[in-house]
Image (tube, helix red, strand yellow):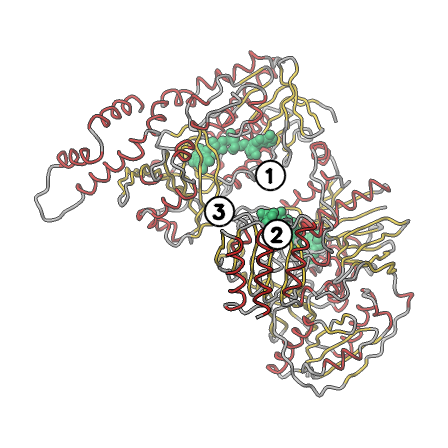
């Protein structure tokens, strides 16, 4: 099977952040492979190991985002395509999907895997937009994947329960990080990754109009979230604490 | 892929990256392994990188506004008692010209930037495809054969090389594993560094500390800073933050039952410090062990056949009051290690003698000369008289000297005598004077 | 006159509260801007929901009925929504943010070539589109965003707006819809473990969340008991859903569900930002953790430092007493 995995490099939400004049500033400039995409890569690797096949990762991003491609290659993906941006285009999910759709137009594949969302923006749009643009059947929020002949059997997490869906090839699946723990590349993987092919594609070749029609949303500014104040800490004798807190929840907060 | 490397470097801190840069330039095939997710990820700290070795590694680094935060042209040593500060302050435009003799760096940024420079150097070398920086890998063992280092092990994987550079930093487990550092290092000679990064509006920071463009200040503190614990304080100006912290004796902390964080809070409440940090927002807190620069904890031998140890893994650090020097020592020792290994490769001999050349070069460098010469200063700084009585005395003198209260003013000599009487016996001071005279 | 269209999510005939929150907001905006607010129910049997909708103030109520909607499947839902949008030509299509709506939001936007905003916590209309706020960076930061064009499709976080009851005189209009099985490329093979009669986590007034500290049967019993005393829904951190201790649909956080109850009690949960992302808007937060430095204490109103095995039994007893008074 030929898998494409769409991967994105995102700022590490654990790194210190600040907002200056409405702009988000990440002092440490720490970027990582989107955790959901790492899970998608992992799942593709497991399927490839069991059934053979090929995995190519695709990333739209600036030069430094190549680190994320290297990471996926070090995990075990076979090759990469890097659609190079300057990083200043202010692209939104819609425009990413458009560019990806143009990329996939003349490609052959069985399945495209995406992350269910970007860790930084939590948008969760690109995958299903891409599916619709390519007229592919799709499933989202996968927590399990299995190859069944030419098809994929997807275990999808819904609101209350899970659904077992069979998606035909070619199709698209967006992956949750709840389905696996992505492998950490070992030394051999890192060393091999250097020799794996990465195709660099100019964004201009894929999307003449990305900054026009297809950018439909814009971030105006960023704001601090109103901070929650830490309340009181209760330490000591369990019976006493239990009594105090239970009383307060009733009388002071009126929530029970 | 069982190919053999010329060298495997363990640890992508300042020492390891410096060594890697030299090896890449010398067309060596090497592997640099870092346990953190990326170089710098384990180094929340920062500080002043003294000297100008950086220009040797990255010529004209100052032309790009990356990696480093500010250059130092303003230095201050401050004595604190409970309510006052008395500073020796030196600022000079002499330091404004590149190459600078001190730049402030934040390690997570700096290490990553330097790693990128190393990657560039690798790409230009003959081994563009065969030399690697490998993050997120923990080296668990140095493989030895007949007393010679031959490779490393990580998990199930083994990799082999003609030489190994251990640049693992202060928690030097591998140095111990190969038997170059005593298994038991008395904590008494180790320190702990605690630090906060405090953010300001950049204009406020520049106004408050009289910074201009990329210029910066470093300030060391003695006295009240440490709440009676041996050690000292520091303040460095970064782009729009300051690094404010303390280096404290582990033994003293334990004996006085104080937690480093509480001592730092005590320091921050000092009226003079409080004025400096007002309006700032703490964005990061970190604590880390540091060596004391005390030779008693240093491994005597820094090499074995096929192996050298550099940077803080070898406890190369000095904290003699006027500055903490750890990164510059790490950088120089990394450079020297790489040079020794490059020579060994030319001669095709990585034996014990070839590796000894590294230690010899280190002994001849400013590092070991300074460490040897300033041992007494190191001990002096950790003398309770120095951390408590002297600062109190100096501040007392300052208070009298700078007071004008419409009374006849005594001669300064008289004031000084009064201050000494109140804070230290002449005898203690005399002893200290002798020590200090010898030490500096 | 243009319309603000709210998709009403229905589970076994019952309307989800979060959909009513969105409808209430659309009603308010419609009144402010002189627009119409319309509600749309797509279900195998939309009638009961459409009837109860009359208490919630929509100007128009639309239904699309087809047996295919008995189970959630994205292809027919997408087709149905696209049909409804073509007929109603709304200015905004708004959904409550659920796994169901996330499943089709992007595809619907692409189908309509429309701008879309996911998971907003506030939104309002502009002359040419929608302005909204949405939490980003694992909900540490709020971004103010703008979407241009008509329609704008968006989903709204649960708990962002209050439900306002209001009689409406709307008649129910059924939109014709055909869907052949051959259009359904995906096969639904099985539905696994839908948590039927339990209290819906994302709508619960009280949530008890269990974390890795809830190690064994004994601890789980205590959690159950606490939940039953407080009539609370049980949720969990990823540590426990991943370990298979609690059903994955009970995960609270960035990957899982967003809850905003009156009372959240976290038991043996450290407070990783990805978990906090899903519960920080709770009104009162109580945390029980034996580690005094656990990050959850930075946001807890009542931080109980202690071993859950020692704290929970007397706490349950005290709550029982309080309840019985
Ligand atoms: C609070 C504080 C303030 C300081 N201020 C200053 C200052 O102002 N100026 C100054 O010059 N110095 C300062 N220092 C000292 C300075 O930080 C150190 O001396 C310097 O970092 C030593 O560099 P290094 O490369 O030897 O070690 P490190 O920078 O510690 O790097 C070692 C690297 O090796 C990695 N590693 C360790 N073990 C393994 C393994 N088994 N496998 C793989 N990787 C491994 C680590 O993750 C780390 O990245 C300060 C220290 C502290 C704590
Ligand atoms: C992209 C991404 C998305 C994620 N999404 C989610 C998500 O949606 N939801 C989520 O929850 N996590 C999510 N995570 C994982 C998250 O980062 C944490 O790993 C997880 O929340 C930890 O769960 P925990 O607090 O139960 O476990 P731990 O962090 O292990 O904490 C257990 C706590 O229990 C305490 N404890 C132990 N024993 C006792 C006792 N006897 N009495 C009292 N206290 C005790 C301990 O002190 C500790 O603080 C995500 C991670 C990533 C990278
Ligand atoms: N720049 C990009 N390059 C490649 N894939 C992307 C990119 N942006 C988003 N994706 C894919 O879309 C998913 C997330 O979509 P969203 O949450 O809309 O940003 C990611 O997990 C990726 O699979």
Q: Is residue A30 above or below residue C45?
A: above
Q: Nearer the viewer, mark 2 or mark 3?
A: 3
Any part of residue A60 in sight: no
Residue B308: name its quadrant: top right
Residue B350: name its quadrant: top right
Residue B340: name its quadrant: top right
Residue in the picture at 56% in, 67% down: C322
Q: Are marks 1 and 3 in contact (CB under 8 Å)?
A: no
Q: Is residue A51 left or right of residue C218?
A: right
Question: Please, which residue is most extreme toward the bottom here?
Answer: C169
What chain does badge 2 belong to?
A: A
Question: Please, which residue is most extreme toward the left here?
Answer: B408
Q: Nearer the viewer, mark 2 or mark 1?
A: 1
What chain does badge 3 belong to?
A: B
Q: Which mark is drawn over residue A11?
A: none
Q: Is residue C262 left or right of residue B241?
A: right
Residue pointed to by mark 3: B284
Determine whether the residue tagged by mark 3 lies in a helix, strand or loop. Answer: strand
Residue pointed to by mark 2: A87
């Amino acid at each position: 099977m030929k898998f494409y995995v769409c991967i994105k490099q995102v700022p590490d939400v654990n790194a210190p952040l600040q907002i200056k004049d409405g702009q988000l500033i990440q002092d440490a400039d720490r970027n990582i492979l989107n955790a959901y995409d790492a899970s998608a890569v992992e799942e593709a690797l497991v399927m490839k190991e069991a059934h053979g096949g090929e995995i190519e990762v695709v990333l739209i991003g600036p030069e430094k985002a190549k680190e994320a491609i290297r990471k996926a290659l070090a995990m075990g993906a076979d090759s990469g395509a890097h659609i190079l941006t300057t990083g200043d285009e202010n692209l939104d999910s819609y425009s990413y999907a458009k560019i990806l759709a143009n990329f996939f137009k003349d490609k052959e594949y069985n399945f495209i895997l995406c992350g269910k969302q970007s860790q930084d923006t939590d948008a969760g749009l690109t995958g299903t937009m891409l599916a619709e643009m390519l007229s592919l059947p799709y499933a989202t929020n996968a927590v399990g994947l299995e190859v069944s002949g030419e098809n994929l059997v997807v275990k999808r997490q819904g609101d209350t329960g899970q659904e077992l869906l069979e998606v035909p090839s070619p199709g698209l699946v967006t992956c949750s990080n709840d389905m696996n723990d992505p492998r950490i590349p070992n030394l051999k993987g890192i060393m091999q990754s250097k020799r794996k092919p990465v195709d660099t594609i100019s964004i201009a070749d894929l999307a003449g109009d990305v900054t026009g029609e297809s950018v439909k949303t814009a971030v105006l500014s960023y704001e601090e979230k109103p901070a929650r104040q830490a309340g009181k800490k209760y330490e000591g004798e369990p019976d006493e604490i239990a009594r105090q807190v239970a009383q307060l929840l009733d009388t002071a907060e009126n929530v029970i | 892929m069982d190919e053999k490397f010329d060298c495997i470097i363990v640890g992508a801190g300042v020492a390891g990256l410096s060594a890697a840069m030299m090896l890449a330039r010398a067309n060596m095939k090497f592997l640099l392994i870092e346990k953190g997710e990326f170089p710098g990820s384990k180094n929340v700290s920062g500080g002043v990188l003294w000297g100008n070795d950086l220009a040797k590694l990255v010529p004209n680094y100052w032309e790009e506004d990356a990696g480093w935060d500010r250059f130092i042209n303003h230095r201050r040593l401050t004595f604190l008692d409970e309510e006052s500060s008395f500073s020796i302050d030196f600022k000079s435009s002499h330091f404004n010209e590149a190459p600078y003799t001190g730049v402030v760096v934040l390690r997570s940024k700096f290490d990553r930037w330097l790693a990128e420079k190393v990657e560039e150097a690798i790409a230009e070398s003959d081994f563009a495809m065969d030399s690697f920086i490998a993050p997120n890998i923990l080296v668990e063992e140095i493989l030895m054969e007949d007393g010679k280092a031959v490779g490393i092990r990580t998990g199930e994987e083994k990799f082999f090389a003609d030489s190994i550079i251990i640049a693992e930093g202060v928690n030097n487990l591998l140095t111990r594993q190969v038997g170059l550092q005593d298994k038991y290092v008395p904590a008494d000679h180790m320190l702990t560094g605690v630090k906060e990064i405090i953010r300001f509006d950049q204009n406020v920071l520049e106004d408050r500390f009289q910074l201009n463009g990329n210029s910066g200040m470093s300030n060391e503190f003695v006295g009240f800073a440490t709440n009676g614990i041996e050690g000292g304080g520091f303040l460095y100006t970064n782009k729009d933050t300051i690094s404010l912290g303390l280096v404290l004796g582990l033994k003293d902390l334990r004996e006085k039952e104080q937690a480093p964080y509480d001592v730092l809070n005590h320091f921050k409440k000092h009226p003079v410090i409080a004025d400096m940090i007002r309006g700032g927002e703490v964005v990061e807190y970190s604590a880390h062990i540091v060596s004391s620069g005390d030779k008693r904890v240093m491994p005597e031998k820094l090499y074995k056949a096929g192996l050298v140890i550099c940077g803080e893994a070898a406890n190369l650090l000095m904290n003699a009051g006027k500055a903490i020097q750890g990164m510059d020592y790490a950088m120089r020792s990394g450079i020297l290690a790489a040079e020794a290994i490059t020579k060994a490769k030319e001669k095709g001999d990585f034996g014990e003698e070839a590796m000894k050349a590294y230690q010899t070069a280190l002994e001849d460098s400013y590092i070991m000369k300074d460490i040897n010469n300033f041992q007494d200063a190191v001990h002096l700084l950790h003398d309770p008289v120095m951390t408590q009585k002297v600062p109190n005395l100096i501040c007392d003198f300052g208070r009298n000297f700078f007071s004008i209260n419409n009374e006849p003013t005594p001669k300064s000599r008289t004031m000084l005598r009064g201050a000494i009487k109140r804070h230290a016996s002449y005898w203690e001071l005399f002893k200290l004077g002798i020590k200090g005279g010898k030490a500096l | 006159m243009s319309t603000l269209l709210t998709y009403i999510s229905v589970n076994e005939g019952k309307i989800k509260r979060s959909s009513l929150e969105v409808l209430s907001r659309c009603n308010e905006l419609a009144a402010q801007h002189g627009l119409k607010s319309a509600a749309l129910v797509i279900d195998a049997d939309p009638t009961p929901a459409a009837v109860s909708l009359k208490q919630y103030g929509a100007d128009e109520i639309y239904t699309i009925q087809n047996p295919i909607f008995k189970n959630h499947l994205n292809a027919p839902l997408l087709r149905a929504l696209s049909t409804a949008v073509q007929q109603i030509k709304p200015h905004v299509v708004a959904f409550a943010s659920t796994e169901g709506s996330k499943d089709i939001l992007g595809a619907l936007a692409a189908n309509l070539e429309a701008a879309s905003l996911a998971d907003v916590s506030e939104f309002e209309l502009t002359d040419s589109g929608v302005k909204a706020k949405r939490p980003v960076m694992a909900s540490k930061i709020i971004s103010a965003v703008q979407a241009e064009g008509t329609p704008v499709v968006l989903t709204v976080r649960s708990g962002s707006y209050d439900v306002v009851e209001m009689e409406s005189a709307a008649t129910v209009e059924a939109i014709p819809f055909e869907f052949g099985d051959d259009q359904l490329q995906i096969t639904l093979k099985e539905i696994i473990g839908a948590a039927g009669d339990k209290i819906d986590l994302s709508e619960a007034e009280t949530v008890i969340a269990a974390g890795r500290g809830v190690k064994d049967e004994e601890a789980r019993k205590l959690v159950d008991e606490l939940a039953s005393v407080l009539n609370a829904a049980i949720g969990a951190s990823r540590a426990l859903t991943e370990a298979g201790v609690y059903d994955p649909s009970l995960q609270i956080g960035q990957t899982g569900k967003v809850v905003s109850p009156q009372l959240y009690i976290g038991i043996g949960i450290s407070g990783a930002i990805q978990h906090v992302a899903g519960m920080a808007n709770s009104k009162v937060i109580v945390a029980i953790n034996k580690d005094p430095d656990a990050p959850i204490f930075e946001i807890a109103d009542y931080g109980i430092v202690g071993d859950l095995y020692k704290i929970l039994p007397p706490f349950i007893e005290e709550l029982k007493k309080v309840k019985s008074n």
